[in-house]
Amino acid sequence: MFYKITHYLKLIRVNNWIKNFFVIAPLIFSLKLFIPEATISILITFFAFCMSSSFVYVLNDIMDVNKDKMHPRKKNRPIANGSISIPRAYIMMLLLLILLIVFILFLNYKTQFIIILYLIFNIIYNLGLKKLNLIESFSIGINFVFRVLGGCFAIDVLPSHWIIIITFFSALMLIFIKRKSELKILRSNATLHRSSLRFYSVQLLDKFINISATIVLFGYILYTLDPHVITTFGSPNLFYSSIFVVLGIFRFIQLSETNKYENEGDPTLLLLKDRFIQYVFVLWLICIIFMIYFK
């Protein structure tokens, strides 16, 4: 029984739900972290995005089952290795869709719209956008922006242009690191598994990673120095949290040059694996909450 449950958890990629924590960012930076109603709305939005993203993951695995069977890492996915049949996968998609509907019924219409748009956009991505040069990477960046917008609308706050910029280019940096990892693992077979990889090289992706990382870093620093931000939080000290952002970015880039977590495939999951990144993230979060709420 437990063995079957683990297969279904792998199918819906529970580990990837960590990406939906971007939904929580607006709660922290809107000064509403300790308002129960706002926290509940964010939690419902978080789980709605989890159901939506898992629905898309299952759809993707069904569509790419033949390619996944030949992939060194993806061949272990439940559908590709035969642990879960395609008919059962469709049943899981139906259950996820039902749960998604239940969750969004508790949200305002703006948040509902964003989540539905996110779902439709991802279906379109799987049907064709993922084959297009650069568009596929930018599409994933937009997905992270959808998450942040969902969090903003759930608690009725206007999305800051700073948080949109930082989120988008953070996602781009991570996806380019992922593409680099795929090229290094798959080598000459890369384009057989992802056609868009034929447009990339490790050297080109290094440039994209560095550009995205630079924009994230300067975007964050400029955000902390923005007079409006300083006035809103009543403190100029947010700037000092930049050190943790620098450390995090450097660590991601450092790991992209090694083989330590190469087989993980998704750099976002490094938050679950790499102790250094975990410590930096926790310290950054404590620093932010302390500077914003306990100044």
Image (cartoon, rainbow, N blue to C red):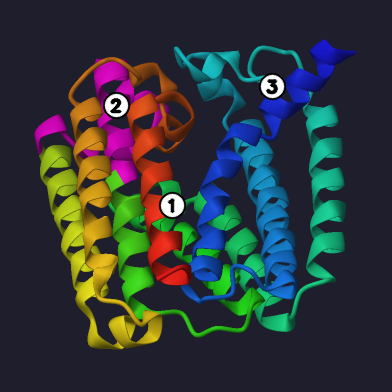
The answer to which of 259 and 80 lies nearer the viewer is 259
Image quadrant occupied by the C terminus: bottom left
Tell me, for residue 218, which label it has, or none. none
The residue where tag 3 is placed is: 79
Rendered view: 285 above or below 83: below
The answer to which of 88 and 272 lies nearer the viewer is 272
The amino acid pointed to by label 3 is: Ile
Q: Alpha carbon of mark 3 to alpha carbon of mark 1: how far?
A: 40 Å
Of labels 3 and 1, the one closer to you: 1
Residue positioned 26% across, 69% down in the render: 237
Please tell me whether residue 180 belongs to the stretch shown in magenta: yes
Rendered view: 107 above or below 176: below
Looking at the image, can residue 13 be seen? no
Instruction: List x then y, in percent, for residue 224.
Output: 25, 71
The answer to which of 84 and 131 lies nearer the viewer is 84
The amino acid pointed to by label 1 is: Ile
Q: Which residues are magenta?
A: 174-203
The residue where tag 1 is placed is: 286
The residue where tag 2 is placed is: 181
Instruction: List x then y, in percent, for residue 54.
Output: 67, 43
Q: Of helix, strand and loop, which one carries label 3?
A: loop
Residue positioned 41% across, 30% down in the render: 270
Task: Name the side, left or right, on which 247 lies relative to 109.
Answer: left
Q: Of helix, strand and loop, which one carries label 2?
A: helix
Image quadrant occupied by the N terminus: top right
Main secondary structure of the magenta stretch = helix
Q: Residues within 10 Å of mark 3 (few under 14, many from 20)?
A: many
Q: Are marks 3 and 1 in contact (CB under 8 Å)?
A: no
Task: Name the side, left or right, on which 47 lies relative to 101.
Answer: left
Looking at the image, can residue 121 be seen? yes
Residue positioned 32% across, 74% down in the render: 162
